[in-house]
Amino acid sequence: MSNLRTALQEYLALRRALGFKLRLAGGLLHRFLQFAEKEGASFITTELALRWATQARCDPSQWANRLGMVRRFAQYRSATDLRTEIPPQGLLPHRYHRKPPYIYRDDEVVQANRYTWIVTMSISRRESLPSAKPSSANPDWFQSIHPRRRCFAAMPTSGSDFPAAGNSKLFRFGEG
């Protein structure tokens, strides 16, 4: 086992003892060492770490993450091997950019509410709801099918769109 492999085992054991899981980082650092051994390197250099990080076919923000993992290992290794180079912070400045959230318009919310006319809360266990539609003439329909559940249903008070502001009434069925 090479000095770098021994150092990696010690590094991962130390970080895990401190509470880090390092599932992804552990696997990637082992791949980095395979790359370094194939290149014939016996210590970490910035150029080696940069070549390894950017060889993957992935988003540039992942290149920066991969380089950051090697950078932290190189910091640890530099305490015992003075030849180790620590890649500078910001060498690959790419960051992941989140997509902006989609804000639903009022008419889209009303349309979505048309299809979500029943909300249930389980008292004893979760089970699927029957596909039967409630009737305003029989408000105990749900209690007869599921006696141990509570149900809140919005019932239309007129023949207009369901449910929209002012034209529905909230009924409570079940125990409690």
Image (cartoon, helix red, strand yellow):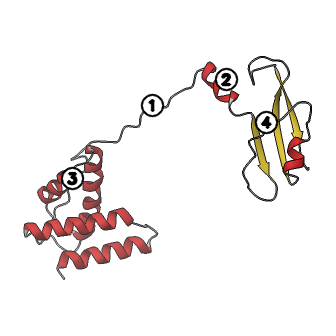
Q: What's under tag 1, amino acid-wise? A: Pro
Kindly state the secondary structure of the residue where label 1 is placed. Answer: loop
Tell me: 39 left or right of 61. left
Q: Nearer the viewer, residue 108 or 161?
A: 161
Q: Quadrant of residue 118?
A: top right
Q: Which quadrant of the rendered structure holds the N terminus?
A: bottom left
- Earlier-in-chain disc, 2 versus 3: 3
Q: Indicate which disc, 4 or 2, sits on the residue closer to the N terminus.
A: 2
Q: Mark 3 points at which residue?
A: 56
In the image, taking residue 68 as reference, residue 121 lies left or right, namely right
Q: How crowded is mark 2: few (under 14 residues within 10 Å), some or many (20 or more)?
A: some
Question: Is residue 81 in view?
Answer: yes
Residue 133 — which label?
4
User: Visible in this render: residue 83?
Assistant: no
Residue 25 at what x, y percent from top left? 33, 63
The numbered mark, 4 or 3, whose residue comes first in the sequence reads: 3
- Tell me the CA gap for discs 1 and 4: 38 Å
Q: Using the image, determine if residue 6 lies above or below residue 57.
A: below
Q: Residue 110 carries which label?
A: 2
* Residue 25 higher or lower than 159, as above or below: below
| Mark 4 to mark 3 CA distance (whole Å) | 54 Å
* Residue name at image x 10 percent, y 69 percent: 38
Residue at the bottom extreme, as displayed: 1
Report, in whole angstroms, how far the alpha carbon at label 4 lies from the one at label 2: 19 Å
Do the CB atoms of the residues marked 2 and 3 lie less than 8 Å apart?
A: no
Choose between 39 and 126: the one closer to the eye: 126
